């Protein structure tokens, strides 16, 4: 889910043009842009607005309504901790605290080296093997404090190797 | 002869390392020059056993529970490819496990047995028999079959599915839609996910039949973005269904037409509410619409629309294949058929339990769940997601039945059962209910938007011992206001878990001596 700095207005318009014929094209377009670039740049908003014959305010309204969409570049890895009840029953409250302390950030923040961002999520459908954490597109179950540390270490190692 | 080895590919198995296990098996088999056929099956729903590796033997499929990648070499050494059942990880024949044997699996009959994206596997176990029958029927006859089944919506509101379909059938329009609600936002629920990840063709078939029944030619599956694995598998299955002529302009040469597309949500609990979902599908913010009009009359893009939960639609192929009566033969009272229940939270044997209505909560949590994972005493159970009441021990003998639950102010909802041991602080749980509503409210009505914010503050004051009696009364009033004045069940039911804590665990909500 790392951010791709290589986007241009043309590349965004291309994404929009591929999808704008769909009924209710707004969410598919926003997803496609975020999948490609990692976030929805402010400049994309006017392109979307023009293409879908809506106002910029309307497009902004949609982006800000949904927790999933982001307007700023993401960290290299996005960590989402499930805060919902089944995970609470298995100790996610202490996992949250541990994660914040380990990473030195709060929810909606990114580590100084831009390696990790931390978000809350409400249920990943993995509730029989709680607590659950999603890192990028991979969901992890039975995340003890030790397992959390191991996951972070694994990602740090991979990032180091990738440079 | 090559050995068949199954390694599940659902989210939970993957979350516990199934991909690494599969890779380790492949490498080890190669190294030892043992021919194996590795199949990525769906999960059986016995989730505490994942990754549950199965080996096909002459006697049946033998299981190895909670397999770790580091174990593979030793397992090969111990002859597990031949189904050595002396190994400590071996749990014997999977289908003989009581957890599975005691279930009544209609919807989950194929789960875990098949490769979820193999059309051949699906067809070999009754797949697409329902559609083939439906293609020979008039729309009204399909609707009648669904009415006869007694099926009630599994998304939470338990509205009779056949009646909903009849309304859409009877509303004249050039364009109609089938929308599958796959937003599954309730904590403690994963049955929709398991359908989509373990038997996606069943949902596709159910939606196609729904299209035939109401004369709709376009279907959408509104899937939450929290389910990347389901997204991938659904799209793969839909592609295959198109290629095989089960979807498209001329279904199996019948001249009937049905198109299907997955649309992703974007992390908003309220988009599980059907009218907010429709707004979201239309590309807007997910705001709840006032009802009437019903979506069945004015739905997606203003057209008549069936909105059904995944489990409701997934029950349809069975009903059309075996007949509505066969389905209605299961159940109790006005709750007909089976309900896929989900055991979650602090539970030793968490997973999917599909049973006819009628089992008591206690039996479910003990006989299937086998108590808490921590081994500590069970204290409270939240059934029906974040809007469901916390049930104390005195209510655990309630049978799983829509009416029995509502009679005691509880909800069955989508069948999620979240268990808590005695370390839980119920005051904290009550606070979370309000906090969740604050985060997820669509913001349209004041009692919900402002009420939940106030709710958090008032609960904080009560827990700190700040004018506790006055604030307790304030909280009571606030709950009533939210129940009476909210447009939808988000604001209207958030008070249920809060009130249940006030009623059954009052001491835990009151100050515990921490200073203000
Ligand atoms: C706040 C809220 C959230 C809901 N979330 C879901 C959901 O995630 N999945 C679902 O199927 N129904 C959900 N519902 C119920 C739907 O509004 C609707 O009743 C259901 O999709 C109808 O399908 P059914 O008749 O097959 O149950 C929710 C309702 C409310 C008020
Ligand atoms: S009750 Fe809450 S979620 Fe429902 S319509 Fe009102 S503000 Fe929106
Ligand atoms: S509650 Fe955390 S995964 Fe469902």
Image (cartoon, coloured by chain):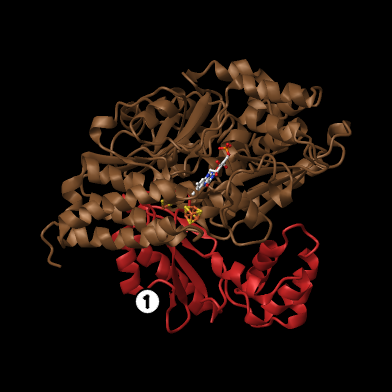
Provide residue B257's location: percent of width, then percent of height. 83, 38
Whether residue B231 appears in this view of the structure is yes
> Which quadrant does ligand 1 occupy?
top right
Provide residue A91's location: percent of width, then percent of height. 30, 55
The quadrant holding residue A34 is bottom right
In percent of the image, x 77 and y 39: which residue is there? B216
Which residue is label 1 attached to? Answer: A105
Whether residue B34 appears in this view of the structure is no
Mark 1, Cα crowd under 10 Å, few <14 / some 14-19 / many 20+, is some
Q: Subunit of mark 1?
A: A
* The one of B516 and B84 positioned closer to us in this rendering: B516
Provide residue A98's location: percent of width, then percent of height. 30, 67
* The one of B175 and A33 positioned closer to us in this rendering: B175
The quadrant holding residue B147 is top right
Q: Establish if A153 lies above or below B65.
A: below
Q: Establish if A1 lies above or below B179.
A: below
Provide residue B342's location: percent of width, then percent of height. 43, 38
The quadrant holding residue B281 is bottom right
Q: Colour of chain B?
A: brown
* The one of A49 and B133 positioned closer to us in this rendering: A49
User: The N terminus of chain B is located in which quarter?
Assistant: top right
Compared across the picture, whether A16 is left or right of B343 comes to right
* The one of B212 and B471 positioned closer to us in this rendering: B471
Q: Colour of chain A?
A: red
In percent of the image, x 21 and y 57: which residue is there? B471
* CB of mark 1 near ligand 3 (< 8 Å): no
Q: Establish if B238 lies above or below B268.
A: above
User: The C terminus of chain B is located in which quarter?
Assistant: bottom left
Q: Secondary structure beneath disc 1?
A: loop
Outermost residue toward the left? B513
């Amino acid at each position: 889910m790392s951010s791709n700095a290589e986007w241009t207005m043309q590349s965004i318009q291309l994404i929009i043009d591929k999808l704008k014929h769909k009924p209710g094209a707004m969410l598919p377009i926003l997803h496609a842009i975020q999948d490609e670039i990692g976030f929805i740049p402010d400049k994309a908003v006017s392109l979307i607005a023009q293409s879908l014959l809506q106002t910029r305010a309307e497009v902004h309204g949609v982006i800000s309504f949904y927790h999933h969409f982001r307007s700023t570049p993401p960290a290299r890895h996005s960590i989402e901790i499930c805060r919902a009840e089944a995970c609470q029953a298995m100790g996610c409250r202490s996992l949250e605290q541990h994660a914040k302390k380990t990473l030195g950030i709060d929810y909606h923040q990114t580590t100084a080296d831009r390696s990790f961002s931390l978000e809350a999520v409400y249920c990943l459908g993995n509730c029989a093997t709680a607590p659950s954490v999603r890192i990028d597109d991979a969901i992890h179950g039975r995340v003890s404090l030790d397992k959390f540390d191991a996951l972070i270490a694994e990602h740090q190692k991979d990032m180091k190797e990738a440079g | 002869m090559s050995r068949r080895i199954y390694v599940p590919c659902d989210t939970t198995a993957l979350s516990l390392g199934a991909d690494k296990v599969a890779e380790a098996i492949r490498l080890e088999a190669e190294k030892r020059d043992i021919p194996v056929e590795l199949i990525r099956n769906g999960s059986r729903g016995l989730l505490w056993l994942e990754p549950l590796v199965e080996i096909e033997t002459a006697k049946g499929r033998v299981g190895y529970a909670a397999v770790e990648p580091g174990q593979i070499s030793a397992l090969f050494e111990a002859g597990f490819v031949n189904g050595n059942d002396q190994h400590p990880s071996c749990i014997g024949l999977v289908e003989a496990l009581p957890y599975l044997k005691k279930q009544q699996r209609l919807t989950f009959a194929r789960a875990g047995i098949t490769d979820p994206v193999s059309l051949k596997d699906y067809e070999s176990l009754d797949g697409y028999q329902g559609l083939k029958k439906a293609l020979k029927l008039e729309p009204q006859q399909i609707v009648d079959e669904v009415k006869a089944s007694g099926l009630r919506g599994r998304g939470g509101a338990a509205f009779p599915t056949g009646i909903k379909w009849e309304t859409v059938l009877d509303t004249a329009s050039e364009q109609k839609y089938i929308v599958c609600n796959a937003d599954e936002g309730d904590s403690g629920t994963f049955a929709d996910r398991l359908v989509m990840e373990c038997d996606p063709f069943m949902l596709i078939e159910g939606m196609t039949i729904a299209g035939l029944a109401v004369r709709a030619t376009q279907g959408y599956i509104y899937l939450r973005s929290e389910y990347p694995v389901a997204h991938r598998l659904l799209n793969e299955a839909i592609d295959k269904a198109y290629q095989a002529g089960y979807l498209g302009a001329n279904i199996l040469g019948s001249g009937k037409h049905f198109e299907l597309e997955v649309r992703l949500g974007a992390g908003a609990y309220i988009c599980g509410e059907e009218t907010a979902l429709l707004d979201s599908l239309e590309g807007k913010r997910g705001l709840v619409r006032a009802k009437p009009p019903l979506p069945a009359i004015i739905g997606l893009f203003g057209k008549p629309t069936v909105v059904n939960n995944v489990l409701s639609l997934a029950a349809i192929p069975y009903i059309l294949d075996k007949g509505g009566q066969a389905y209605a033969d299961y159940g109790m009272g006005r709750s007909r058929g089976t309900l896929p229940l989900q055991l979650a939270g602090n539970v030793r044997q968490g997973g999917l339990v599909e049973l006819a209505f009628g089992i008591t909560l206690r039996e479910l949590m003990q006989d299937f769940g086998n108590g808490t994972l921590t081994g500590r005493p069970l204290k409270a159970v939240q059934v029906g997601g974040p809007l469901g009441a916390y049930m104390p021990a005195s209510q655990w003998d309630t049978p799983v039945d829509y009416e029995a639950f509502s009679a005691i102010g509880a909800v069955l909802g989508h069948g999620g059962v979240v268990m808590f041991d005695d370390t839980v602080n119920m005051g904290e749980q009550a606070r979370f209910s309000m906090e969740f509503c604050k985060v997820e409210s669509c913001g349209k009505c004041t009692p919900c938007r402002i009420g939940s914010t106030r709710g958090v503050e008032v609960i904080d004051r009560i827990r700190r011992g700040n004018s506790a009696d006055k604030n307790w009364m304030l909280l009571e009033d606030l709950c009533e206001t939210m129940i009476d004045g909210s447009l939808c069940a988000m604001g209207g039911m958030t008070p249920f878990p809060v009130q249940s804590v006030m009623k059954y665990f009052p001491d835990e909500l009151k100050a515990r001596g921490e200073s203000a």
